[in-house]
Amino acid sequence: MILHVETHEREKYAKQLRSYFRLRKKVFVDQLRWVETTDGDIEFDELDVFPCTYTLYVDKNDEVLAGARLIPTTQMTLLERWFPELLPEDMSFKSPTIWESSRYCIDGVRSGKKLSSGAKRANLAINIGNLDYALRVGITEFITVVEYRLFAMSNTFGMGGQILSEWEYDGMRVVCVMISITEENKALADKMRVFL
Amino acid sequence: MKIAIAPEFRNQLGLPSVKKRVLQRMVTAKADLRCRHISIWAEHRLKGKKELTVISTFPTSWISKYSIGGFSKLDPSIQKGLSSAGALIFDFEVMSRETSDQFAPQVLKADIGRYAVCVPVNKFVDLNVAVTFTFDVEPQSIGPTGTEPIMARLQQYAHSLVKIEFGELPEHSKTSDVLTKREQEVLRAVKSGKTYDEIAEILGISKWTVVAHIRSVKAKLGTVRLSDTLTEALARKYIH
């Protein structure tokens, strides 16, 4: 099931959020080593304190299989805070309709079978979840920094977006991507829903 | 606390009035979005002191319920909207069946719009705003203008109203009004009638980067429509 958790719903979905923050710790602290600081068994940064929305893909026990954090670029974003050099020259990206997707992670063990495209079902779920949310609230583009591997997976659904810049981090290919919410994306998402 | 009201989008003698530029933008938004009313509920800090600003086009009889009837504690746009990131849509017909409080039935009785869309505008702890637009029909059934869907236009109008009313706070210096060299180049090309594809080719960037530059310019100038964006940029002499 795909959930969108707004700031005022954090209490209602406390169990699922806790599971997401644990997954973030596993992925960003233990595996990728992109983040050094943690709060016990969870990863929770300063941007989680402010209003944001979480797209979560949860199993029947409310355990999170994949998740992402969505923040309007009119607020402080991860890209602006930590990766400003990744943006194309002379560009601010600050618009109420451009949102950042960050802390996108998938539980590699429990994220479900691979689809024929080779991508994981959980990856498809987050792509569709983000698209649905964008249509609901009026987001026109997402901007995100992800491992190239995840970008390539999303690209197999036609939802990868366009690479704005890329670089290598600790031997890993990382890309800054812009995903536009287009009629083509909507049509693709509707076709792919049957795989969820 | 500051209260400014323009019932039915008109400032009236004897009532605390809405700033002319804010009211003009509200009138434009009403015509563009076909909404019934617009209301701004802003909680902000000035010199460490918590302040409340309310700007509204609701009838005075409805606004008075917020002070007399304590509706601010019941209004979901305020209660949920102030702490959300994304827009929230409320259908008061459905709510009046599903909730026991008197807010939704009173909305329907007052005939101020069956639907409300609350667009949060958050600027960290310094400024939290819920901009509410009410509609008689389901907002998402209202078609796009050009390429912009209704919800995207609502976001832009909400942010532009907040920008006009509150301006740029020092904490938001990163969203300065000054256009970058690239943004000016893109805008000049738009003014000369070039399409986004043509601009992308000329400047050696992608079409979506062109789109993002335009969105950034709109956010900086507090505009929604491209024609208004060009007019504003000309007025401020960013382009000639």
Image (cartoon, rainbow, N blue to C red):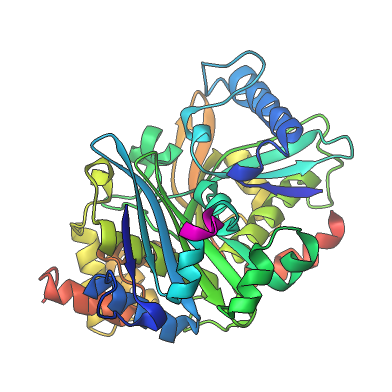
The one of A97 and B141 positioned closer to us in this rendering: B141
Q: Residue furthest top?
A: A40
Query: Image point 70% across, 28% down: which residue?
Result: A18
Query: Image point 73% across, 48% down: which residue?
Result: A3
Could you tell me if residue B145 is visible in this image? yes
Q: Is residue B100 left or right of residue B51?
A: right
Query: Image point 45% across, 77% down: which residue?
Result: B59
> x, y percentage for residue A26?
68, 22
Q: Is residue B162 left or right of residue B102?
A: left
Locate residue A135: give its quadrant.
bottom right
Residue B69 lies in magenta, yes or no? Answer: yes
The one of B19 and B31 positioned closer to us in this rendering: B19
Is A82 rendered above or below residue B37?
above
Is A101 rendered above or below residue A110?
below
> x, y percentage for residue A106?
71, 36
Q: Which residues are magenta?
A: B67-72
Is A62 rendered above or below residue B57?
above
> x, y percentage for residue B219?
33, 62
The one of B166 and A110 positioned closer to us in this rendering: B166
Q: Residue furthest front?
A: B68
Q: Is residue B166 left or right of residue A67?
A: left
Could you tell me if residue B190 is visible in this image? no
The one of B71 and A183 positioned closer to us in this rendering: B71
> x, y percentage for residue B134?
54, 74
Is A69 rendered above or below residue B16?
above
| Magenta part, dominant SS | helix
